[in-house]
């Protein structure tokens, strides 16, 4: 069989496969055709933090990722500042998650805190697509309502090229890729071991935990964090003026203002070198915030009181660093309360 015949047969097979999948997949996964651009979320927002805010009625609510979780002791912060504090650390999150937490959790509670503090680093505030896909998508789903048009636009649709948009709407094999991957993962993870060894779901989960869940290679973990940081250091992301309008930052500021909440942006210190171009980004951010009357910037990026001895890796503090930073933060919170 010559190459031309092979190519023709392949194209015929591929065309039939696309047609068959285009007919079968929308019905099987209950996906409309054409499919809407942007993700669909489960309708229920995670309520545990809403309930806790309504019960504790904090003055300050803190939002951030694992840097907040490892770097701030909310009990010590409350004790030292004299204010009620509630913390919502979401390890692995970015501004898309923080926007949802502000909109659907903090402002969805019956109690309004006076201040919401968002802990960030480098260019995270203006990279809306950062940590929104793959395993990070579940973090968004925890705090998203069924329809989140702004989230869909900024974090997903604006990041797609025309070909991706066409495929997402009109090629079910592409639009159903997440569902297909989940089914394939379940097949390989659970059904194959069950068929071959009789090991059911709990058995497989225990085996995976025993094999991979006990030890973490600190060097490998640190390298993963450094690799992720390169996204934030992309030259295009360093242009604050260019990126700000298409980010969640202005919407978070407006949400806070509309609800009489003061937004505190806390730039955390990291235990690693940063590109010199970030200085221009930081200056542009500061100038942007000075024109907003309901925003306070607390900048600890170059704070000499925090030293390499306070960190366990490039981002996260150890117990001593956590205690030190919590006390430093409490000093500034006391000053804010006194204004």
Image: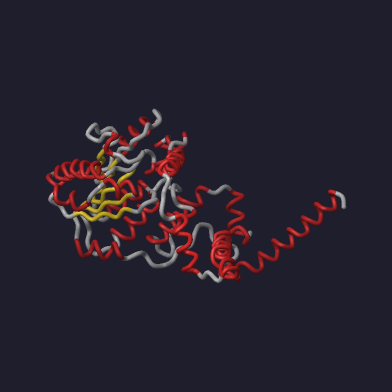
Q: x, y (%) of residue 127?
A: 42, 44
Q: Residue furthest right?
A: 1
- The answer to whether residue 319 is left or right of residue 152 is left
Q: Image quadrant of residue 105?
A: bottom left
Q: x, y (%) of residue 198?
A: 55, 71
Q: Residue at 57% across / 60% down in the picture?
A: 181
Q: Residue at 44% across / 59% down in the picture?
A: 209
Q: Residue at 28% across / 52% down in the picture?
A: 256
- The answer to whether residue 96 is left or right of residue 264 is right
Q: x, y (%) of residue 17?
A: 71, 62
Residue 257 in the image: above or below residue 31: above
In this figure, which colouring scheme has been used for the structure?
secondary structure
Residue 27 in the image: above or below residue 265: below
The residue nearer to you, when weighing 166 against 3, is 3
Q: x, y (%) of residue 31?
A: 56, 67
Quarter in which the C terminus is drawn: top left
The residue nearer to you, when weighing 240 against 12, is 12
The residue nearer to you, when weighing 50 against 78, is 78
Q: Residue furthest top?
A: 276
- The answer to whether residue 157 is left or right of residue 63 is right
């Amino acid at each position: 069989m010559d190459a031309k015949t092979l190519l023709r047969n392949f194209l015929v097979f591929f065309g039939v496969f696309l047609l068959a999948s285009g007919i079968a997949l929308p019905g099987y996964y209950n996906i409309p055709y054409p499919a809407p651009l942007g993700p669909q979320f489960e309708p229920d927002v995670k309520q545990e933090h809403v309930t806790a805010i309504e019960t504790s009625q904090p003055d300050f609510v803190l939002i951030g990722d694992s840097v907040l979780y490892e770097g701030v002791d909310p009990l010590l912060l409350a004790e030292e500042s004299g204010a009620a504090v509630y913390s919502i650390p979401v390890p692995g999150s970015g501004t898309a998650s923080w926007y949802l937490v502000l909109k659907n959790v903090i402002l969805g509670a019956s109690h309004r805190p006076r201040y919401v503090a968002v802990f960030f680093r480098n260019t995270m505030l203006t990279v809306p697509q950062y940590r929104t896909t793959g395993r990070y998508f579940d973090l968004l789903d925890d705090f998203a309502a069924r329809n989140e048009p702004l989230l869909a636009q900024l974090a997903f649709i604006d990041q797609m090229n025309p070909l991706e948009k066409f495929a997402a709407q009109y090629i079910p094999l592409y639009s159903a890729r997440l569902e297909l991957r989940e089914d394939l993962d379940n097949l390989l993870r659970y059904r194959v071991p069950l068929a071959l060894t009789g090991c059911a779901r709990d058995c497989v989960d225990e085996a995976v935990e025993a094999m991979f869940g006990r030890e973490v290679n600190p060097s490998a973990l640190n390298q993963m964090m450094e690799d992720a940081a390169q996204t934030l250091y992309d030259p295009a992301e360093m242009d604050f003026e260019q990126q700000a309008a298409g980010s969640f930052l202005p919407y978070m500021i407006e949400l806070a203002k509309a609800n009489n909440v003061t937004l505190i942006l806390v730039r955390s210190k990291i235990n690693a070198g940063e590109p010199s171009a970030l200085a221009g980004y930081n200056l542009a951010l500061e100038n942007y915030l000075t024109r907003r009357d309901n925003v306070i910037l607390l900048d600890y990026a170059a704070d000499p009181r925090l030293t390499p001895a306070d960190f366990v890796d490039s981002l996260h503090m150890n117990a001593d660093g956590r205690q030190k930073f919590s006390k430093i933060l409490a000093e500034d919170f006391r000053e804010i309360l006194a204004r």
